[in-house]
Image (cartoon, rainbow, N blue to C red):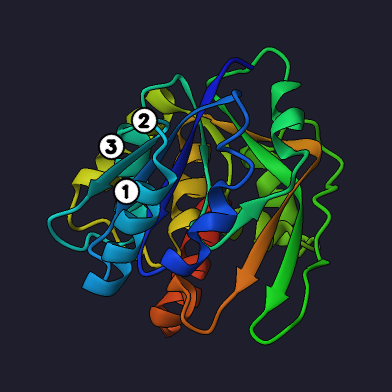
Amino acid sequence: MKKISLALPTYNTSQYFDDCIKYALDDDFIDEIVVNDDCSSPEHFQTFKSKIENINSKKIKLFSNTKNVGAFRNKYQTVKNCSNEWVYLLDSDNYPFEESYQLMRGIPDSDPNIFYSPQHLCCKHDGANDFEVVSDYNFGYDLIGIEESKKCILGNIEWFGWLVNSGNYIVNKDRYTEVLKEPYENVETPLLHADTAAVFYYWLKSGGKVKIVEGLRHNHRLRSDSNWHSCGNNSQASVNYYETAIKQL
Protein backbone atom coordinates (compact mmCIF):
# COMPACT_ATOMS: atom_id res chain seq x y z
CA MET A 1 0.00 0.00 0.00
CA LYS A 2 1.29 3.45 -0.93
CA LYS A 3 1.19 6.53 1.26
CA ILE A 4 -2.20 7.17 2.80
CA SER A 5 -4.18 9.88 4.55
CA LEU A 6 -5.12 9.74 8.22
CA ALA A 7 -8.71 11.01 8.44
CA LEU A 8 -9.89 12.33 11.83
CA PRO A 9 -13.54 13.40 12.06
CA THR A 10 -13.69 15.40 15.30
CA TYR A 11 -16.35 16.62 17.70
CA ASN A 12 -15.47 17.83 21.20
CA THR A 13 -12.49 15.45 21.46
CA SER A 14 -9.55 17.85 21.50
CA GLN A 15 -8.20 16.18 24.66
CA TYR A 16 -7.39 13.05 22.63
CA PHE A 17 -5.84 14.75 19.60
CA ASP A 18 -2.20 14.24 20.62
CA ASP A 19 -2.74 10.48 21.04
CA CYS A 20 -4.48 10.22 17.64
CA ILE A 21 -1.60 11.71 15.68
CA LYS A 22 1.52 10.90 17.71
CA TYR A 23 2.73 8.04 15.48
CA ALA A 24 1.46 9.60 12.26
CA LEU A 25 3.50 12.79 12.50
CA ASP A 26 6.87 11.03 12.22
CA ASP A 27 5.85 8.26 9.82
CA ASP A 28 6.22 9.08 6.12
CA PHE A 29 3.62 6.43 5.29
CA ILE A 30 1.04 8.95 6.53
CA ASP A 31 1.19 11.61 3.85
CA GLU A 32 -1.39 13.92 5.43
CA ILE A 33 -3.58 14.22 8.53
CA VAL A 34 -7.03 15.55 7.64
CA VAL A 35 -9.07 16.89 10.55
CA ASN A 36 -12.73 17.71 9.88
CA ASP A 37 -14.49 19.28 12.86
CA ASP A 38 -18.27 18.98 13.23
CA CYS A 39 -18.98 22.24 15.07
CA SER A 40 -17.26 21.44 18.33
CA SER A 41 -17.71 23.85 21.21
CA PRO A 42 -15.62 27.04 20.86
CA GLU A 43 -13.31 25.76 23.61
CA HIS A 44 -12.61 22.45 21.89
CA PHE A 45 -12.22 24.00 18.45
CA GLN A 46 -9.80 26.60 19.77
CA THR A 47 -7.80 23.82 21.45
CA PHE A 48 -7.63 21.95 18.13
CA LYS A 49 -6.41 25.08 16.38
CA SER A 50 -3.85 25.88 19.07
CA LYS A 51 -2.45 22.34 19.07
CA ILE A 52 -2.18 22.29 15.29
CA GLU A 53 -0.47 25.69 15.26
CA ASN A 54 2.01 24.57 17.94
CA ILE A 55 2.80 21.33 16.10
CA ASN A 56 3.40 23.41 12.96
CA SER A 57 3.34 20.48 10.53
CA LYS A 58 2.37 20.80 6.88
CA LYS A 59 0.88 17.32 7.19
CA ILE A 60 -2.12 18.56 9.18
CA LYS A 61 -5.07 20.07 7.34
CA LEU A 62 -7.97 21.46 9.39
CA PHE A 63 -11.51 21.77 8.03
CA SER A 64 -14.67 22.74 9.91
CA ASN A 65 -18.36 22.34 9.14
CA THR A 66 -20.64 25.35 9.18
CA LYS A 67 -23.22 23.30 11.09
CA ASN A 68 -23.26 20.02 12.99
CA VAL A 69 -24.04 17.19 10.54
CA GLY A 70 -23.58 14.14 12.79
CA ALA A 71 -20.96 11.40 12.83
CA PHE A 72 -21.99 9.61 9.61
CA ARG A 73 -21.88 12.72 7.43
CA ASN A 74 -18.85 14.19 9.15
CA LYS A 75 -16.87 11.03 8.43
CA TYR A 76 -17.96 11.21 4.80
CA GLN A 77 -16.77 14.81 4.55
CA THR A 78 -13.47 13.97 6.24
CA VAL A 79 -12.73 11.22 3.72
CA LYS A 80 -13.82 13.46 0.85
CA ASN A 81 -11.34 16.14 1.99
CA CYS A 82 -8.43 13.68 1.80
CA SER A 83 -6.14 13.82 -1.23
CA ASN A 84 -4.72 10.28 -1.25
CA GLU A 85 -6.22 7.20 -2.88
CA TRP A 86 -6.32 5.34 0.45
CA VAL A 87 -7.50 6.62 3.82
CA TYR A 88 -7.24 5.38 7.39
CA LEU A 89 -10.52 6.59 8.92
CA LEU A 90 -9.92 6.77 12.68
CA ASP A 91 -12.36 7.86 15.38
CA SER A 92 -10.91 10.89 17.11
CA ASP A 93 -11.02 9.36 20.61
CA ASN A 94 -9.09 6.28 19.44
CA TYR A 95 -5.47 5.81 18.47
CA PRO A 96 -3.32 3.18 16.75
CA PHE A 97 -0.43 1.21 18.14
CA GLU A 98 3.16 2.02 17.23
CA GLU A 99 3.34 -0.90 14.80
CA SER A 100 -0.01 -0.17 13.14
CA TYR A 101 1.31 1.77 10.17
CA GLN A 102 3.98 -0.83 9.47
CA LEU A 103 1.24 -3.48 9.28
CA MET A 104 -0.80 -1.27 6.95
CA ARG A 105 2.20 -0.93 4.66
CA GLY A 106 2.16 -4.69 4.26
CA ILE A 107 -1.41 -4.90 2.96
CA PRO A 108 -0.92 -6.52 -0.47
CA ASP A 109 -2.79 -5.70 -3.67
CA SER A 110 -5.18 -3.22 -2.10
CA ASP A 111 -8.66 -3.73 -3.53
CA PRO A 112 -10.98 -0.67 -3.64
CA ASN A 113 -13.97 -2.92 -2.95
CA ILE A 114 -12.54 -3.99 0.41
CA PHE A 115 -12.56 -2.30 3.81
CA TYR A 116 -9.40 -3.35 5.68
CA SER A 117 -10.22 -3.74 9.37
CA PRO A 118 -8.16 -4.08 12.56
CA GLN A 119 -8.23 -7.52 14.13
CA HIS A 120 -8.16 -6.39 17.75
CA LEU A 121 -9.63 -3.61 19.84
CA CYS A 122 -7.99 -2.69 23.11
CA CYS A 123 -10.62 -0.92 25.19
CA LYS A 124 -10.45 1.34 28.22
CA HIS A 125 -13.51 2.31 30.25
CA ASP A 126 -13.89 5.68 31.91
CA GLY A 127 -11.77 5.72 35.03
CA ALA A 128 -9.70 2.63 34.11
CA ASN A 129 -5.93 2.92 34.27
CA ASP A 130 -5.05 1.10 31.07
CA PHE A 131 -6.36 -0.58 27.93
CA GLU A 132 -7.02 -4.30 27.62
CA VAL A 133 -7.59 -6.49 24.58
CA VAL A 134 -11.28 -7.33 24.46
CA SER A 135 -11.91 -8.50 20.90
CA ASP A 136 -10.52 -10.94 18.36
CA TYR A 137 -12.10 -10.71 14.91
CA ASN A 138 -11.32 -14.31 14.02
CA PHE A 139 -14.47 -15.34 12.20
CA GLY A 140 -12.93 -17.94 9.89
CA TYR A 141 -13.41 -15.99 6.65
CA ASP A 142 -10.78 -14.45 4.42
CA LEU A 143 -13.34 -11.92 3.17
CA ILE A 144 -16.60 -10.95 4.84
CA GLY A 145 -19.45 -10.11 2.50
CA ILE A 146 -23.23 -10.39 2.67
CA GLU A 147 -23.50 -14.15 3.23
CA GLU A 148 -20.71 -14.28 5.81
CA SER A 149 -22.27 -11.34 7.66
CA LYS A 150 -25.68 -13.00 7.69
CA LYS A 151 -24.20 -16.18 9.17
CA CYS A 152 -22.36 -14.25 11.88
CA ILE A 153 -25.41 -12.17 12.82
CA LEU A 154 -27.81 -15.12 12.81
CA GLY A 155 -25.29 -17.21 14.75
CA ASN A 156 -24.68 -14.41 17.25
CA ILE A 157 -20.95 -14.87 16.68
CA GLU A 158 -18.85 -13.25 19.39
CA TRP A 159 -17.36 -9.86 18.49
CA PHE A 160 -19.08 -9.59 15.13
CA GLY A 161 -21.24 -6.78 16.46
CA TRP A 162 -18.06 -4.91 17.36
CA LEU A 163 -16.78 -5.30 13.81
CA VAL A 164 -20.04 -3.86 12.48
CA ASN A 165 -20.10 -0.97 14.92
CA SER A 166 -16.48 0.02 15.59
CA GLY A 167 -15.03 0.92 12.21
CA ASN A 168 -11.53 2.43 12.02
CA TYR A 169 -11.18 0.89 8.57
CA ILE A 170 -8.64 1.56 5.81
CA VAL A 171 -10.77 2.58 2.83
CA ASN A 172 -10.41 3.60 -0.79
CA LYS A 173 -11.45 7.25 -0.95
CA ASP A 174 -13.25 7.20 -4.30
CA ARG A 175 -15.10 3.95 -3.65
CA TYR A 176 -16.12 5.02 -0.12
CA THR A 177 -17.54 8.35 -1.27
CA GLU A 178 -19.28 6.72 -4.26
CA VAL A 179 -21.02 4.06 -2.17
CA LEU A 180 -22.11 6.41 0.61
CA LYS A 181 -23.06 9.42 -1.50
CA GLU A 182 -26.77 8.57 -1.63
CA PRO A 183 -27.31 8.09 2.15
CA TYR A 184 -25.05 11.09 2.79
CA GLU A 185 -27.10 13.40 0.56
CA ASN A 186 -30.54 12.00 1.45
CA VAL A 187 -31.82 13.85 4.52
CA GLU A 188 -34.38 11.07 5.04
CA THR A 189 -31.81 8.28 5.44
CA PRO A 190 -33.00 6.54 8.64
CA LEU A 191 -31.19 5.91 11.88
CA LEU A 192 -27.64 7.07 11.22
CA HIS A 193 -26.93 7.35 14.95
CA ALA A 194 -24.78 4.19 14.94
CA ASP A 195 -22.89 5.56 11.97
CA THR A 196 -20.51 2.66 11.42
CA ALA A 197 -23.35 0.12 11.41
CA ALA A 198 -25.00 2.16 8.65
CA VAL A 199 -21.74 2.33 6.69
CA PHE A 200 -21.26 -1.44 7.07
CA TYR A 201 -24.73 -2.10 5.63
CA TYR A 202 -24.37 0.22 2.64
CA TRP A 203 -20.91 -1.18 1.93
CA LEU A 204 -22.19 -4.77 1.84
CA LYS A 205 -25.22 -3.71 -0.22
CA SER A 206 -22.88 -2.27 -2.86
CA GLY A 207 -21.03 -5.59 -3.15
CA GLY A 208 -18.17 -4.49 -0.91
CA LYS A 209 -16.40 -6.80 1.49
CA VAL A 210 -14.34 -6.54 4.69
CA LYS A 211 -10.93 -8.10 5.29
CA ILE A 212 -9.39 -8.46 8.73
CA VAL A 213 -5.73 -7.42 8.82
CA GLU A 214 -3.95 -9.92 11.06
CA GLY A 215 -2.27 -8.30 14.05
CA LEU A 216 -3.62 -4.81 13.37
CA ARG A 217 -5.17 -3.24 16.47
CA HIS A 218 -6.09 0.08 17.98
CA ASN A 219 -6.97 1.61 21.31
CA HIS A 220 -10.67 2.32 21.74
CA ARG A 221 -12.04 4.53 24.50
CA LEU A 222 -15.41 3.63 26.02
CA ARG A 223 -16.67 7.08 27.08
CA SER A 224 -19.85 8.11 28.84
CA ASP A 225 -19.94 11.19 26.55
CA SER A 226 -19.31 9.29 23.29
CA ASN A 227 -21.52 9.55 20.21
CA TRP A 228 -23.08 6.21 21.18
CA HIS A 229 -24.16 7.46 24.60
CA SER A 230 -25.14 10.94 23.46
CA CYS A 231 -27.63 9.43 21.00
CA GLY A 232 -29.30 7.43 23.78
CA ASN A 233 -31.66 4.62 22.76
CA ASN A 234 -31.31 5.63 19.11
CA SER A 235 -27.84 4.04 18.99
CA GLN A 236 -29.03 0.51 19.72
CA ALA A 237 -32.12 1.06 17.57
CA SER A 238 -29.80 2.02 14.72
CA VAL A 239 -27.66 -1.11 15.15
CA ASN A 240 -30.77 -3.30 15.26
CA TYR A 241 -32.16 -1.63 12.14
CA TYR A 242 -29.03 -2.15 10.05
CA GLU A 243 -28.36 -5.68 11.28
CA THR A 244 -31.93 -6.55 10.23
CA ALA A 245 -31.33 -4.84 6.89
CA ILE A 246 -28.17 -6.92 6.37
CA LYS A 247 -30.12 -10.13 6.99
CA GLN A 248 -32.59 -9.04 4.30
CA LEU A 249 -29.97 -8.39 1.61
Q: Amino acid at mark 1?
A: Asn
Q: Residues within 10 Å of mark 2 (few under 14, many from 20)?
A: many
Look at the numbered disc 3 and give the secondary structure of its residue.
helix
Whether residue 112 sits left or right of residue 37 in the image: it is: right
Tell which circle, 3 or 1, labels the residue nearer the N-terminal end: 1
Q: In this rendered view, identify the residue nearer to me: 232 or 2.
A: 2
Disc number lying in front (3 or 2) = 2
Residue at image x 35%, y 64%? 11
Q: Which mark is residue 75?
A: none
How far is disc 3 from disc 2 in space, using C-alphas? 16 Å
Which residue, as the protein is rendered here, is positioned at the far left? 66
Residue indicated by mark 2: 82
Residue 243 appears left or right of 72: right
Asked where in the image residue 202 lies, by quadrant, the reply is: top left
State the image coordinates of residue 195 (x, y, percent, origin top left). Answer: 43, 58
Q: Height in image: 17 above or below 85?
A: below
The span from disc 2 to disc 1 (Cα, nearest Å) is 10 Å
* Mark 1, residue position: 36
Spot occupied by residue 249 in the image (x, y as percentages of width and height): 52, 44
Kind of residue at disc 3: Lys
Residue drawn 39% across and 55% down? Answer: 51
Three-letter residue code for mark 2: Cys
